[in-house]
Image: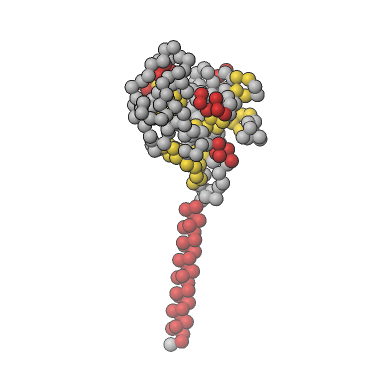
Amino acid sequence: MTGMKQFIFATTSLLIASATLFLSCKKDTAGAGTTSNATLPDVFKKFNTTVTISVEGNYVVLKSTGIPDHKSPYFATTNAQYEAYNGTNPNYAKNPNSIQSQSYVFKIPVSPVKASASTTTPLGPMGISINGVPLFNQYAAGNAPLTNEVNSFDQYNGHPQQTGQYHYHVEPLFITQQKGRNALIGFLLDGYPVYGPMENGSILTTSQLDGYHGHFAVTADYPNGIYHYHITADAPYINGNGFYGTPGTVTQ
């Protein structure tokens, strides 16, 4: 009888050990390739408090309503943020849309790397500015140039599309007026930063940048240097022929 008890005990112990090993291996496999203990890079502290920021694995997650932190004629006249157009474009013509709150979730790489093959930037949000407003590429609907659409930009160079998504295609003047024309503007979906048009005291043009509308250089936020995009006054304004890195995602 004693021998039978010893056999049952030994068998039970073996089964428990096997199950423990299986669960341990399963847990390790599920966690492979993630950095759940990653810390948020200090540069993301430059986003304003309307943007909720966290880290999930290899990604920084930014949640925003997309409402700008400045005034605009695209708010309802009863809204405290309403301001009639007072910019410098004599051809300004307000479009029929109005600013509406959104539910953006941007997931961008914590540590971006150059993509082996470039991905074309989409129509719609291709990045996020430090005030939570999306950055759009150099095209209007149907991949048309901004030639006519530029006349609907408000005094801070933004406007809403049909569903009320306020966005910037070009230099966000409120940010550069407040932070400086050499300041961080935001990030594209590939995790690389976007800076204003000034660097080392000079205003850049597209001809001084690569095909993606950026270059590698030291910045105030990256003393060891990083690839970054620049906004310019000439097309493609923010980004050229696709993302330099591998883009994350945006849901809305």
Q: Nearer the viewer, residue 241 or 124?
A: 124
Q: Quadrant of the N terminus?
A: bottom left
Asked whether the viewer can see residue 126, the reply is no
Please tell me which residue is depicted at 46% across the width and 17% down the height of the picture: 87
How is the model colour-coded?
Answer: secondary structure
Q: Residue at x 55, y 50 (%)?
A: 37
Q: Given the current orientation, which residue lies at the most extreme top position?
A: 90
**For residue 216, which quarter of the picture?**
top right
How many marks overall?
0
Q: Nearer the viewer, residue 190 or 79?
A: 79
Name the residue: 36% across, 32% down. 100
Quick one: quadrant of the C terminus? top left
**Residue 120 point in image, percent of width and height:** 45, 28
Q: Is residue 182 left or right of residue 166?
A: right
Q: Residue at x 49, y 61 (%)?
A: 24
Q: Is residue 247 above or below residue 154?
A: below
Above or below: residue 214 compared with residue 251: above
